[in-house]
Amino acid sequence: MNGLISQTNTQNLFCKPGKNREFSDILNEVQAYISSKYSALVIDGINNINKGNDEVKAQVKRYIGKYLLDYRISAEGMTQQELIDKLYTEMAEFSFLTKYIFGTGIEEININSWDDVEVQYSSGETVKLEEKFESPDHAINVVRRMLHVSGMVLDNTSPAILGHLSKNIRIAVLKTPLVDEDVGVAASIRIVNAQKLKKEDFLKSGTAADEMMELMSALVRYGVSTTVAGATSSGKTTLTGWLLTTIPHDKRIFTIENGSRELDLVERDESGKIINKVIHTITRESEDEKKSITQDNLLDMALRFHPDYIVVGEMRSSEADSAQEAARTGHTVITTIHSNSCESTWRRMVTLCKRKYPNVDDKVILNLVTEAFPIVVYAKQLENKQRRIMEIMECEILPDGERKYHSLYRYKITENRMENGKFVITGSHEKCADISPSLQRRLLENGMPQEELNKLLRKESEK
């Protein structure tokens, strides 16, 4: 950090809670002192939250403790250490949100208003917190501090911001005037679960049947480009992460993600030596459009690294066209996309590709994307918060060029009812069809042993 940050700029990062509470009065006094004496140190603390370096944190807390001791300041109902800890959290961390942001088992924090905050757990359960910000201004300033980590500024000229807290925590923010004055700020903090799930975890939770998991991993392993589709919180990234762990270590993987990193594919042996081949990349936004690095740019760069697999974290725009081009020229591309069914996934790809080539006929693009991505896996979070792979579909290209869509597996709901105010949903996965003969030939050409292919196909007695 070059030089000291001015007291004024530093205080903009601090929260400004109400003055009617005893703790608020203490906070105002202590932060005024600390910001005037140790502003650069506090900024270092903000930039290093949860990075394992507690030296700055301990030093700031010592200064806070000394000030409280020198002026004999205390708070009713709190020990001196509790007061020090809370003051530090309010001044250099993210208020009461800190323990949720860096806790375990939490996937998302939604700030609907300064006094309405809810947490979504990995189980799918959503809980409204009793805790709240002191005021709309307090909420805005805490969120500003979050965005400071990624170098973003939230103000009236930039009231809508996408930022990140770390490589696996994304934050989307709206402030006044885009939301009402009495709301202050609305934000969604998305926390990627660092836990690496095994196939047994998906089976135990009922997300998919064993043979479905075997089929998906075999298709990816033997070079069939695949798209995992679904809405937010449907489990797309978690499933994609597992699929990528089934790739042999001698294959090079190049990942491209937008703004923050959700995938963590690097594997090490007991001595810490990396045993697979992974290059993780993320996009970079800039106010100068020429300096921005998009997913499209990184896809172009990926081809220079001669990857066996290219992973596009999420198709959002014109990079869909680059992805289908890569998939049709010998690379295996794995990606996710927001859609509400398997068939609509290919149509959405067409829409995204047309952002680059708006004058190309839809049917031409549809032919390209179905050739590029013959397999779509559709995931969904049900009303009871359980995640299920609802369908695996193949688009078969017939000899005359016609396209035939057919389900390979589908989740069939057998009961859907309410019980004691909760949804009760039961169902099972069923196999609908084998992969097409043309896809079978492709797998054999890509090195799949005949015995392994036979295991993926239905037995004669089942036909």
Image: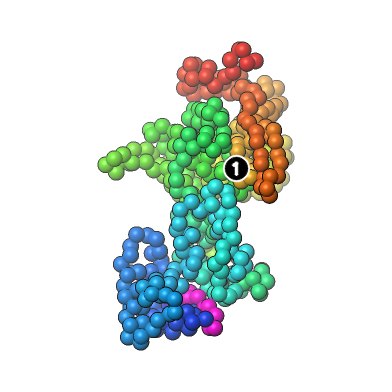
The secondary structure that dominates the magenta segment is: loop
- Residue drawn at (32%, 80%), measured in percent from left and top? 66
Q: In this view, does 101 lie above or below 388?
A: below
Based on the picture, tell me whether residue 17 belongs to the magenta stretch: yes
Residue in the picture at 54% in, 47% down: 123
Comparing 402 with 453, the one in front is 453
Please, which colouring scheme is shown?
A: rainbow
Q: Which of 245 and 322 is in front in this view?
A: 245
Q: Residue at x 43, y 72 (%)?
A: 86
In front of the other: 20 or 230: 20
In the image, residue 108 lies in the stretch drawn in magenta = no
Is 151 placed left or right of 119 in the picture?
left
**Position in image of residue 165 (x %, y %):** 47, 60
Q: Mark 1 points at which residue?
A: 386
Q: Is residue 130 left or right of residue 305?
A: right
For the N terminus, the quadrant is bottom left
Q: Nearer the viewer, residue 224 or 33?
A: 33
For residue 95, above or below residue 189: below
* Residue at x 41%, y 68% (from the top left corner): 46
Residue with the most extreme bottom position: 71
Let me know if residue 337 appears in the view. Answer: no
Is residue 25 found left or right of 276 in the rendered image?
right
Whether residue 89 is visible here, answered yes or no, is yes
Provide residue 129's location: percent of width, then percent of height: 56, 62
Task: Give above or below for 365 relative to 456.
Answer: below
The kind of residue tagged 1 is Gln
Measured as percent of width and height from the top left, residue 52 is found at 34, 59
Q: Which residue lies furthest to the top in this view?
A: 460
The part of the chain drawn in magenta is 13-20
Q: How crowded is mark 1: few (under 14 residues within 10 Å), some or many (20 or more)?
A: some
Q: Is mark 1 on a helix, strand or loop?
A: loop
* Quadrant of the rendered image containing residue 266: top left
